[in-house]
Image (cartoon, coloured by chain):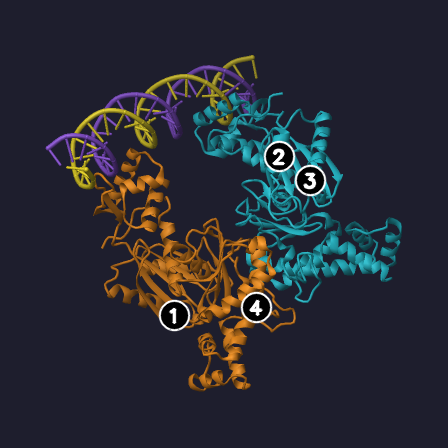
Chain colours: A cyan, B orange, C purple, D yellow
Amino acid sequence: MRRMTARPANAHQARLLRLLRDGGPNSRAQLGDQVDLSRSKLAVEVDRLLETGLVVADGLAASRGGRRSHNIRLAPELRFLGVDIGATSVDVAVTNAELEVLGHLNHPMDVREGPVAVFEQVLSLAAKLRASGLAEGFDGAGIGVPGPVRFPEGVPVAPPIMPGWDGFPVREALSQELGCPVMVDNDVNLMAMGEQHAGVARSVGDFLCVKIGTGIGCGIVVGGEVYRGTTGSAGDIGHIQVDPDGRPCACGNKGCLEAHFSGAALARDAEDAAREGRSPEFAARLETAGRLTAADVAAAAAAGDAAALDLIREGGNRLGQVIASLVSFFNPGLVVIGGGVTGLGHNLLASVRTQVYKQSLPLATGNLPIVLGELGPTAGVIGAARLISDHLLSPA
Amino acid sequence: MRRMTARPANAHQARLLRLLRDGGPNSRAQLGDQVDLSRSKLAVEVDRLLETGLVVADGLAASRGGRRSHNIRLAPELRFLGVDIGATSVDVAVTNAELEVLGHLNHPMDVREGPVAVFEQVLSLAAKLRASGLAEGFDGAGIGVPGPVRFPEGVPVAPPIMPGWDGFPVREALSQELGCPVMVDNDVNLMAMGEQHAGVARSVGDFLCVKIGTGIGCGIVVGGEVYRGTTGSAGDIGHIQVDPDGRPCACGNKGCLEAHFSGAALARDAEDAAREGRSPEFAARLETAGRLTAADVAAAAAAGDAAALDLIREGGNRLGQVIASLVSFFNPGLVVIGGGVTGLGHNLLASVRTQVYKQSLPLATGNLPIVLGELGPTAGVIGAARLISDHLLSPA
DNA sequence: CAACTTTTTCCACACTCAGGACAAAGGTCG
DNA sequence: CGACCTTTGTCCTGAGTGTGGAAAAAGTTG
């Protein structure tokens, strides 16, 4: 099968392609309403896009009171691969050009096994998706890794939780293997892009997206664009100090947010509570499973276990404390909380909200929604697809 | 005298005008090197600018090895007014089109006297500048106020330290009085723009500018543009909590940064130290002046007073703690510290740096300069002039 | 003074794009 | 079902924009 070769030749074409991506099939007339080009100019550009094959005719639209318009849509055979490498598992999904997830696979895996092993897994999952008939090939791939990335080159830099990846040419390597363009970003940024594209953050220009998984990170969106900082480490809030005399952290400091509240910290606290006899619920679960995870805390809390609720409340307070600072500083229009521990759900949300509304000034919190992400594990892969799609739909 | 009436007609003209503003007089050929337009196109646009009167001929340039080029420059009679309203004084300056300060006046004044009294003062200072022959009129004015501003309308919103200004139509009123376009912004944002235009932050795209005066604020520059947040309160870091059991703050919370370290807090601490006999230096100064200010702390520190040095070190630690969090979050390329207390100078800088380098991760701090602003009180007024200049040099 | 540069002007040609005229296609109402 | 309206798509013209070459103007260097 022939893959996507063409790229938009100018800003007008890029604009049209994005409208088709985000709004689905559309008639020429509807497009005309949105772009402020003369009918003739629009017709020319659409014709050129049809010639390139990026866009195809798609039947007739419903009448709006007169002659029916011809629909057009992005080529239905285009496929993007979205890859989300987490600390403990990889997600791989295939989407169409409109970034709808056609198939999604997850595989538990420790990122510390290193880039070679992980890529082997990613490629095998991608092959599985291809074999199931969802795609004959990929026109582009986005990939998220749990650490800072030098974005232009697509290379992880000094990632604390994934030694062995430092400087590994992720973009280059994957592009070689897949034979298509690849873009790499931090997993948290991709989650933010996912929620922006298809989740709760649609139509919000400036927002924060806090992801709590094994670690804690924060995606920053400014004017609809992800902000990555000078060295690509923006949003690295896991090592903000929340208690000068707090717990030691893997980074060498004391009292980091991550040391007090994260998937890993929560699991350890739950195990401690179980062993110290403070929670029969945890003890029972530890007995059965051999170890505890954030999911156990969520389940125990749902069952009304006091120790679990305590852990969530305390953690939510710590997190809320940091978010309150960020809200004062950044004045976002929305705060999204996502990641593995969102199972803690509304208990967590409640204590975060309490803390933020208490500590930040009314002008910043007045109309500030603090909500859970609505896409769950697909946020990352949708964001990844969006990343490469944004790249490919830019003028060459 | 005829004031500036024309505005650039298109993006090319705007580009050229900004080059002339930031680079001073320039030859057509030099401009050509910078803008990537064909010679003919460039000539046409320059001719049009000359017609409008925004730009004038300015003699011959030095030869670059062949025929000498005709210089052009922004109309030398253009004048911008920069106004910086602080908590305890107002600064008013007049600049030419290249944003060079031609005259600068300062007048102590309490912002709480309200907008009417303050404007009376501002207009009187502006009249004085005009009377001294520096300007015959103003082509635009920028004005900074010490609180959040709804930027598009130029109206302060819920400013904590300036009751009576809430909702006052600053832009509208001043524009009426001065008879020229006016833009209003937070004073901290203007300081950031000033340092960006003519100070330490030239050529840095993403940076933070922390201003410590009566209160504490932080200007945020993203990709060369000031970021103001969803409701215009971005950068309001004075009420970030640095100590859950800390001092009560005017905002109603406890342990706000501002309650522990700011011009006002410092003065109070110094007076306490004097009264409690912990510092003969402070006691002597209090005796003489009747009250103490941040400047006294600076002077005492310079004289080697232990209590003063303690205050600075402790305050610097608090501030450094907050800046460390912001650095982790925002990953700036530069942190500028300015405002009234910069007299504390390198003592302050040292403790801030220590704290930041200790608490933030190497990837973010690796190549992060933390420096004092180099413009002092002119940063605000230059920023104000820059604000209105940016506005007027945008295509209409 | 001759040879070489740089700057500026002039001009012809290609290209872009808006908007009007008109044809095609469908709806609506009597 | 047919007259009349609206909407959509196509074609065409004219105004304007922008490029690049040629040549003149103005200097420099040896």
Residue A172 vertical placement versus B106 (above, below)? above
Q: Are marks 3 and 2 in contact (CB under 8 Å)?
A: no
Secondary structure of the residue carrying tag 3 is helix
Residue A57 vertical placement versus A279 (above, below)? above
- Which residue is identified by label 3? A378
Q: Amino acid at mark 1?
A: Ala
Secondary structure of the residue carrying tag 2 is helix
Rendering coords of residue A301 (x, y %) = 80, 55
Rendering coords of residue A392 (x, y %) = 55, 32
Q: Residues within 10 Å of mark 4 (few under 14, many from 20)?
A: many
CA gap between label 3 and label 2 equals: 24 Å
Q: Are marks 3 and 4 in contact (CB under 8 Å)?
A: no
Q: Are marks 2 and 1 in contact (CB under 8 Å)?
A: no
CA gap between label 3 and label 4 equals: 42 Å
Judge whether residue B18 can be spotted in this image. yes
Q: Chain of mark 1?
A: B
> Which of the pair A167/B30 is nearer the observer?
A167
Q: Nearer the viewer, mark 3 or mark 2?
A: 2
Q: Nearer the viewer, mark 1 or mark 4?
A: 4
Q: Residue at x 42, y 86 (%)?
A: B288
- Which residue is identified by label 1? B117
| Quarter of the image with the C terminus of chain B in it | top left
Rendering coords of residue A288 (x, y %) = 89, 50
